[in-house]
Amino acid sequence: MKVYTDSLHKIAYATDASVYREIPYGVAYPATVEDVQELMRLVREKGIDLIPRAGGTSLAGQVVGSGLVVDISKHWNKILEIRAEERWARVQPGVVRDKIEGFQDEWNAKGWAFHSTDDIIKALQENPDYQLSFR
């Protein structure tokens, strides 16, 4: 399980939709339960916090900190069940608003409230080795 500790990943995850900013130890994108277990062992050994991030971006600093950011939205992003008549859906924690909005007409979900992630974070999820030069 790779932990990204480069500046780009750390800066991208140093803030949320709030005014808070703190550089994390690193960022990881687990794909399996075993990956999450490995990351849990890592943070325990290092004595740092695990900061979970998923499909909704925090609005008040809840996902900002100096620990290890574990972003499960890259791999844990499936819609598992939809009950439109009851107005609910069961999704994995990484499902973002755009994915659900694509089905709104199909299951009459207009008006449901959803949150979305930041474009830079989406780019990093699609290609964790993405390089960007700041000038």
Image (cartoon, rainbow, N blue to C red):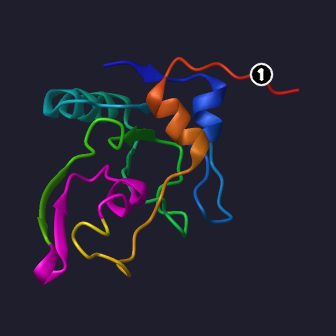
Q: Amino acid at mark 1?
A: Ser
Front residue of 49/54: it is 54
Q: Quadrant of residue 46?
A: top left
Question: Residue placed at 54% from the left, 23% from the top?
Answer: 5
Residue 43, given in percent of the width and then of the height, sits at: 33, 34
60 to the left or right of 76: right
Question: Residue placed at 25% from the left, 30% from the top?
Answer: 31
16 to the left or right of 45: right
As helix, strand or loop, the secondary structure at mark 1 comes to loop
Question: Residue placed at 36% from the left, 31% from the top?
Answer: 29
Count of marks overlaid on the render = 1
Q: Is residue 106 above or below residue 33?
A: below
Residue beneath disc 1: 133
Front residue of 81/47: it is 81
Residue 90, given in percent of the width and then of the height, sits at: 15, 62
Queried whether the magenta region covers residue 94, the answer comes back as yes
Residue sitting at the far right: 135
Residue sitting at the far front: 106
Queried whether the magenta region covers residue 129, the answer comes back as no
The C terminus: image quadrant = top right
For the question of whether residue 2 can be seen, the reply is yes
Residue 1, given in percent of the width and then of the height, sits at: 30, 19
Residue 13, given in percent of the width and then of the height, sits at: 56, 43
109 to the left or right of 24: left
Instruction: Read off the magenta span.
Output: 84-103
Q: Is residue 102 above or below residue 43?
A: below
Q: Is residue 84 above or below residue 66?
A: below
Front residue of 105/116: it is 105
Q: Residues within 10 Å of mark 1 (few under 14, many from 20)?
A: few
For the question of whether residue 26 can be seen, the reply is no
6 to the left or right of 70: right
